[in-house]
Amino acid sequence: MLELPQDIAGLQALYRSGEVTVSEIVAAHLKRIEALDPQLNSVVTLNRAAMDDAARIDAGTTPRGTLFGVPVVLKDNIDTAGIATASGSAALAAHVPAADAHLVVRLREAGAVILAKTALPDFAMSWHGHSSRSGVTRNPYDLSRDPGGSSSGTGAAVAAGLAMAGVGTDTGGSIRVPASFCGLAGIRPTVGLVSRHGVTALVREQDSPGPLARSVADAATLLEAMTGWDPDDPVTALANLPHTVEQRRTRCRPRPSRGPGSVCCASCARQRPVTIPTSRGWSRRASPRCVKQERR
């Protein structure tokens, strides 16, 4: 069996040297899932197109991004086009989204290969690895113990080497708890740093998707790929603006636009504008200096 690298940097070095192909790495991870997951019960749905995705990357038809050829798993409350997304519930086992969540789009654009969807308790409402859809998920370090939740399947799968890294969601510990139980690096990002569009949230105002990986460096690489503005999640506009002491001192405020948007002041018009969607149905258009929303 192919010896798998322990981190993303090691995997990228193998790709650059030409020692392995993306298809070989993906196939090796799928074989590992087949061999080990019956004991762990961390994976609920395999991506049947994973090998096709790997072949496209090998053929050079996709850009070489920061996650080039990196096999990842996703918590099963994150939408994936054509792959069931049940949020851990037997009641939603037949639900198949028509489109990828925004963060999945960004992962694919960075070159990641989605291997599988992973287990979670029903609707992420527990810190334990048990759901009505998939049953009990076990900790790879001790099968008699729990991997933590609610990103239980992602934590167990990454710790067992079934994927290089994975994505969970966190409202009140759902990334951090399995990271602690499974010896991983987990990051709960600031709400809005990663788009929540296409993610079934437990608490909309608190949920934040984030990475689980075997090193801090890998978690940071995954987070960077997922981060970015999404017009379908207005909070991302503010979370992804640069916030510095100088910017916080700025008194300049955006003002409502009558059309697609307007620059808030003459000094800001000289800088590159960004559009800030709001829940009121119109947009605010401002430069990176205009980081403070108008209070009404």
Image (cartoon, rainbow, N blue to C red):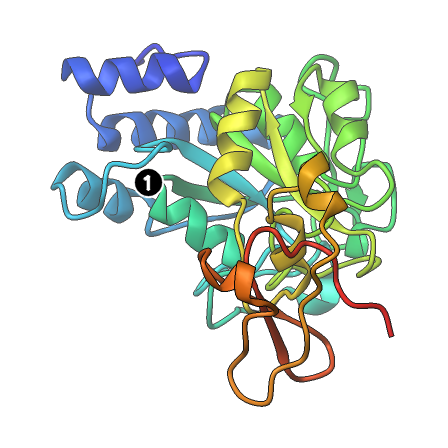
The residue labelled by disc 1 is: 111
- Which quadrant of the figure has residue 21? top left
Quarter holding the C terminus is bottom right
Does any portion of residue 41 appear in the rendered image?
no
Name the one closer to the observer, 9 or 229.
Answer: 229
Query: Would you place residue 179 above or below residue 111 in this image?
Result: above
Does any portion of residue 160 appear in the rendered image?
yes
Name the one closer to the observer, 62 or 234.
Answer: 234
Query: Which residue corresponds to the image point at 72% horizontal and 54% vertical from the top-left?
Result: 88
Locate residue 30, reporting x and y percent.
39, 32
Query: Which residue corresponds to the image point at 19% horizontal and 46% vertical from the top-left?
Result: 56
Task: Answer with left or right where residue 180 lies relative to residue 119.
Answer: right
Task: Answer with left or right where residue 99 lies relative to residue 278.
Answer: left
Query: Which residue corresponds to the image point at 41% horizontal and 20% vertical from the top-left?
Result: 8
- Which quadrant of the figure has residue 184? top right
- Which quadrant of the figure has residue 247? top right
Name the one closer to the observer, 266 or 208.
Answer: 266
Q: Amino acid at mark 1?
A: Gly
Name the one closer to the observer, 186 or 194.
Answer: 194
Quarter holding the N terminus is top left
Question: Is label 1 in a helix, a strand or a loop?
Answer: loop
